[in-house]
Amino acid sequence: MRSISNGTHITIHRAGQLDASLSRAWHKAMDESPDFANPFLAPEFAAGIGGCRGGARVAVLHEDGEPVGFLPYERNSFGVGRAIGLGLSDCQALVHRPGITWDTGQLLRACGLSVFEFDHLVAEQQPFGPYVTGTFPSPVLDLKPGDGDYAQWLRATYPGLAKTTLKKERRLGRDLGEMRFVFDERDPRALRTLMRWKSAQYRRTGRMDRFARPWIVDLVDHLFQVREEHFTGVLSVVYAGDRPVAAHFGPRSRTVFAAWFTAYDPEFRYYSPGLIMHLRMAEAAARDGVRLMDMGRGDKEYKDWLKTRELRVAEGFATRPHPVATAHRLWRRPVRGLRNTVLAHPTLREPADRLLKTVGTLRTSARTSSAGAAPRAR
């Protein structure tokens, strides 16, 4: 137990070991503010990370004996902290009851942290404000349930996209077999197909292959099994005949659905299966009670087509005076700044994207050639 001020203290827990009463209090805080309805802010996501990474913790703020705030984070042996799931999570926050505030320096001290890094912090987190280095748009889609079928919903919601998308779907159905969409697919083989497609996409585009990291595979496998009110892992699949052509895996809460991992069979890329996937998901999620589809920070053409508005998310480094915090900030901030500069300017972003794709093509070709070569004599 770490004292913060009169009547307030903090306890530290392993992320996967919160008792039922603390989980209920966390869920209650999520329910009391739309800022915290995102499934990445649920204790189930923190617990999933905690089962895969040993440094995952939760700081619980208590006021007059009642748990009123929850900060999930990861800590390394040097006292460097970061938002839980940094690099994977598209929403980060200290989830708290209305009216609760905190002193960030004292919070870090209670957590044993010299620095706390974040990159998708919700804008409501005012005590972290002095440590924000930049804010960025995060596109979202406000969902309205339709009374008709998918085609009617699509024409009413996206009249500009409807004709082209429906035409491509019909053509794909004629070429491969009847189109079928499953919003909540429970077949783990489909999840493996998605991971295989996504790994190939990462390599093809020169990005880091997340599914080459066993802990991320384990995390997704675990979250696929979680089916709770505030967090459910949802696998969605578009089939043409009996063949999957596009898939998505992401979490949902009662009212928010987070777009996360989407991929498709590149053999059918001319049918725009990724766009078909997102449109089908949006319509099905709306029917299932979801009110907001969060597409995450980042510039993508399909996000501009689909979004109805944008939220703001922040990145930065909350610190307290410590040599480790200074070193970490000096190391990480220029890297983040360079990346953000490239992403913010099309004249830089497009050549960088082409370079990554060229590297990905060369890397994939080299791997294929190596796999096909005869083994050398030792």
Image (cartoon, rainbow, N blue to C red):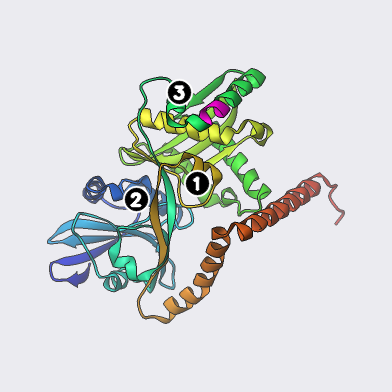
User: Image check: 83 left or right of 20?
Assistant: right
Give, as a three-letter code, the residue at label 1: Asp
The residue stretch that appears in magenta: 161-165
Percent x, y of residue 251: 41, 41
Q: Considering depth in this image, is 3 or 140 the residue closer to the camera?
A: 140
Q: Is residue 36 visible?
A: yes
Q: Quadrant of residue 254?
A: top left
Residue 59's spot in the image, x, y percent? 29, 61
Q: Which residue is mark 3?
A: 150
Where disc 3 sits, the SS reads helix
- Residue that carries the numbered disc 1 in the rendered image: 218
Residue ID at (23%, 50%): 29
**Which circle's residue, 3 or 2, is located before the other in the chain?**
2
Q: Closer to us: mark 3 or mark 2?
A: 3
Quarter of the C terminus within the rendering: bottom right
Residue closer to the observer: 132 or 328: 132
Decide if residue 151 is on the left or right side of residue 25.
right
Whether pointer 1 and pointer 2 mark residues with C-beta atoms closer than 8 Å, the reply is no
If you read the primary sequence from the N terminus, does the residue marked by circle 1 or circle 3 appear first?
A: 3
Q: Does the magenta-highlighted stretch encompass residue 144?
A: no
Q: Residue at position x 41%, y 44% from top?
A: 140
Image quadrant in which the N terminus is located: bottom left
Q: Which mark is residue 41?
A: 2
* Alpha carbon separation for disc pair 1 and 3: 34 Å
Could you classify mark 2 by the number of other residues whose Cα lies within 10 Å: few (under 14), some (14-19), or many (20 or more)? many
Q: At label 2, which amino acid type do we have?
A: Leu
